Amino acid sequence: MTSIRQMEYLVAVADVKHFGRAAQRCNVSQPTLSQQLKTLEDRLKVKLVERQSNGVQMTPVGRIIAERSRDILVAVQDMQALAKRASEGTIGTVRFGVSPTLGPYLMPDIIAKLHSEMPELKLYIREGIPSDQAEELSSGVIDVLLGPLPIDGTMLHVEPLFQEPLHIIAPPDHELASKNDLTNEDMAKIGFLTLDPRHHFYRQVERICASLDARIMRDYEGTSLDSLRQMVGSGIGLAIMPEFYLRSESTGENMVTRLTPKSWSAKRSIAMAWRRGSANEDDYRQLAERIRTIGLSRLQTPFL
């Protein structure tokens, strides 16, 4: 009979295409993982992986069995969570994925409030690229995901929470910073900095720049919102920043200033997602509602 552990090994190899990294992910030695996969192949009487000098490739049947194994592993996790919820009456530890363009600037307030209200709730925070984390959510690596829309994945419930305003920032001595009656048309042909293309934020800024007839400065992609702000402050170009980032005490609008064209109204939609049918789905709904309330409260507080 195929064991849960063997399925974990197979899924890990399918994900990383490398025995050594798969073994590290599963916290076992490489020989152990390799031997267990060989045992699984012998038991199923089919070849699952092709061992090559530059890594590992899944056979067609191996890909199918790995995906079915992934579904089984997620179901087992949900059963374990349901049993724990029934025996302890608490949500416990939640593996919480969050976008790096949101988490550092919103989560501190959320964690402080949730800890005082729900001390039994523990959040294991994992920052990552939203599209990557959507895959991790579908495969059971994380339990919930907080980030900008769109959030796409298999069998996910996506709960929209609120809209976060976006703002144009510039160095204080930029010619547009002192211009009266600024309009969107003033942004035409202006160079904008943004993050690398893996981020949703890049694609949103790209769409905004297209609507403004502005241009993306592709030679100066930032690795974080902080790096973007610093490049803007040094005079390389303009950037678009989320409201929560600009409200952050550790960053804020130091070295930059906001530009506010008359018809400017750019926003991004923030949502929380979890696997549909999860054992803790009701708890996640309550958590999402609490985050919505905290987020809206912060947005409604005047920014000084």
Image (cartoon, grey):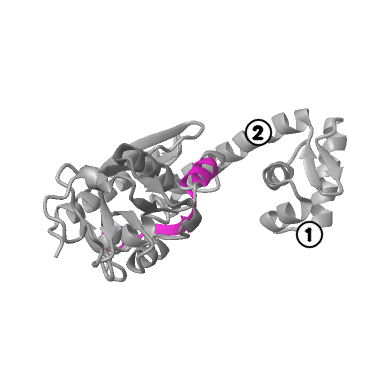
Which residue lies at the image location 48% right of the left edge and 51% below the top edge?
218
Q: Quadrant of the N terminus?
A: top right
Q: Quadrant of the C terminus?
A: bottom left
Q: Amino acid at mark 2?
A: Glu
For disc 1, the marked residue is: 29
Which residue lies at the image location 43% right of the left edge and 60% below the top edge?
224
Question: Secondary structure under badge 2?
Answer: helix
- One can see residue 123 in this view: yes
Quarter of the view holding residue 21: bottom right
Image position of 112 (left or right of 44): left
Q: Is residue 223 magenta?
A: no
* Real-space Cα separation, disc 2 to disc 1, in angstroms: 23 Å
State the image coordinates of residue 239 (x, y, percent, origin top left): 34, 55
Which residue lies at the image location 76% right of the left edge and 28% below the top edge?
60
Image position of 143 (left or right of 265): right
For disc 2, the marked residue is: 67
Q: Is residue 125 magenta?
A: yes
Q: Which residues are magenta?
A: 113-137
Question: Secondary structure under badge 1?
Answer: loop
Q: Amino acid at mark 1?
A: Ser
In this picture, is 117 found above or below 296? below
Neighbours of disc 2 within 10 Å: few (<14), some (14-19), many (20+): some
